[in-house]
Amino acid sequence: MLDFSYATTLKKTEVNKQYDQFTWDHPGSSSQVLRDGQPKDAGMVEAPLNEIDQIIQNAINQKVMPGAVVSVTRKGIKVKEQAYGYAYRYLDDKFTETDQPILMKKDTIFDIASISKIFTSVAAMQLYEKGKFQLDDPVAKYIPEFAENGKGTVTIRQLMTHTSGFEPGIPLYKMGTSREDRLEIVLKHGLSNPPGTKYTYSDLNMITLGVLIERLTGQRQDEYVEQHITDPLGMKDTMYNPPESLKPRIAATEYQPWTGRGLVWGQVHDENTWSLDGVAGHAGVFSTAHDLTILGQTFLNEGKYGQSRILKPSTVQLMEQNMNQAFPGNDHGLGFELNQGWYMDGLTDVNTMGHTGYTGTSLVISPKNKAVVILLTNRVHPTRNTVSTNQTRRLVARHAADAIPVAIPGNKDAWFAGYGDNKKAILQAEVNIQKPSILSFQTWYRMESDSDIGKVEISQDGITWNELGALTGNSGNWQKESYQLPEGTKFIRFQYVTDGSVNERGWYVLQPQIKTDHKNITPQFTSTDWELRNR
């Protein structure tokens, strides 16, 4: 059970008074630029944020990654930014320790891998705003050679939503002799599926989109991104191909004997991007937690940061829409992944945006809560053959979500079912129903739809249970539930059943009561899994 000592040190009424205006889905106004602050300034609870420290330390101890930086921001207020472990620790893929390790710092620069796709998408949408193309234009209208091998009908929208029909990727670094050669190989490459018939996450889509940007602007992508995105937003530590002088600030990545590079450090990790001179639509960007938070805040501010606007509000709204309704579970906007619980966890929602990177990075943006959560790791240092970072991604997002309080009606304590995979959390009471009665309670829940279930059950002997009802998905606001209790009912329980992945914000039950003979009786519920909470 989690320790929420910060909240419990305050009186119940004080907690609710402090957080009511900034509770879940009700964040209030947001700062237009980032500023440092305390969790309470953003309407958040401190204890869950503090617990992130142990999550990361455990992952480091298990060699999931050598080091990490975590950043949590809400309403433009940066409430947590912490560095852990090492930016550089190993000499080779045998985990040989260097005698000159470099500690991770808050301003360590990371190869953010596929989060680079967001920069490519923003650049493309800036050109869309200028009328350079329409989303459903064929790519071949602007890149004629792209029409080869049956790709004449593939649209720009399909590139951005990974529905073009491309396979996931090809070993481009083993092909061609120059950036130009390799880009031509991608443009002429065939499809694995007819356009628009299947979702397949593919680097080839974004490499092609990067070429589109270069054809329409006459600039290489890194030059365009610097001029139109990173410079206007003041993202001073975000770039392609960082100079050698910055190497001491950059997190080392993988030891790659197969590319002849040895330990990759200060160069892009992705082999295909490396073969494209470090500049490609799918990878290549280096950045810091602070700079990525600026980018996230720009989307929460509808395309503006401070006095700099890089996108129109209508364009941001378009990018946040799920374009992949035909492919359930693969929700995708224009460049952004949406509603992906496998790394968004407690912040998962239909409009929660994000992206991950192969090097161990993730960005989560929650418009409903005006929150930006970033986890940057060098998990491929010294080898990609390590434990997955996905559980760490989930736990960081979960604790950031848990720090955002749920407003409970009437300043009451509500039962909270907690978090966990493959969980069966039981809240139970013994009763003695001698005539038909009614069980009623108020409830609020955010559960993974159809995978995590809140069950209301009764029993006459405590062994055999009958289900009165089941809840899943999103309750919206607090709602009242009522169920008939037959004569002879001896036990009532609420059972929260989860699957092996994804916990959303969870299940709350408030004031369960039994109405019988025009009287309201409050059963005495007990649990080792559930806890009483005032937020």
Image (cartoon, rainbow, N blue to C red):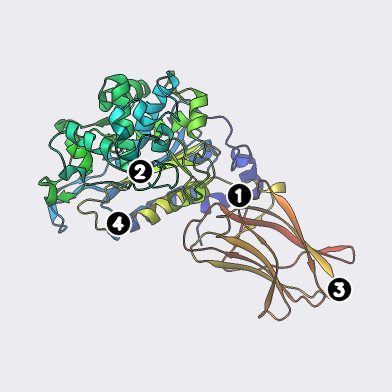
Badge 2 marks a residue whose secondary structure is strand
Rendered position, 458 above or below 199: below
- Which amino acid type is shown beneath numbered disc 4? Val
- Residue linked to disc 2: 82
Q: Secondary structure at mark 4?
A: loop
Give the Cα distance between marks 1 and 2: 25 Å
Whole-Å distance between the Cαs marked 3 and 1? 35 Å
Whole-percent x and y of residue 136? Answer: 45, 30
How far apart are the alpha carbons under marks 4 and 1?
33 Å
| SS at badge 1 | loop
Q: Quadrant of residue 183?
A: top left
Residue beneath disc 4: 64
Does label 1 or label 2 sit earlier along the sequence? 2
Secondary structure under tag 3 reads loop
Quadrant of residue 177 within the rendered picture: top left
CA distance for labels 2 and 3: 58 Å
Q: In which image quadrant can residue 164 be found?
A: top left
Q: Which residue is mark 3?
A: 435
Mark 1 crowd level (few <14, some 14–19, many ≥20, 10 Å Cα): many
* Sequence order check, earlier mark of 2 and 3: 2
Type of amino acid under label 3 = Lys
Other-residue count near label 3 (Cα within 10 Å), few / some / many at <14 / 14–19 / ≥20: few
In this rendered view, identify the residue nearer to me: 228 or 413: 228
Tell me residue 201's x, y (percent): 37, 46
Number of labelled discs? 4
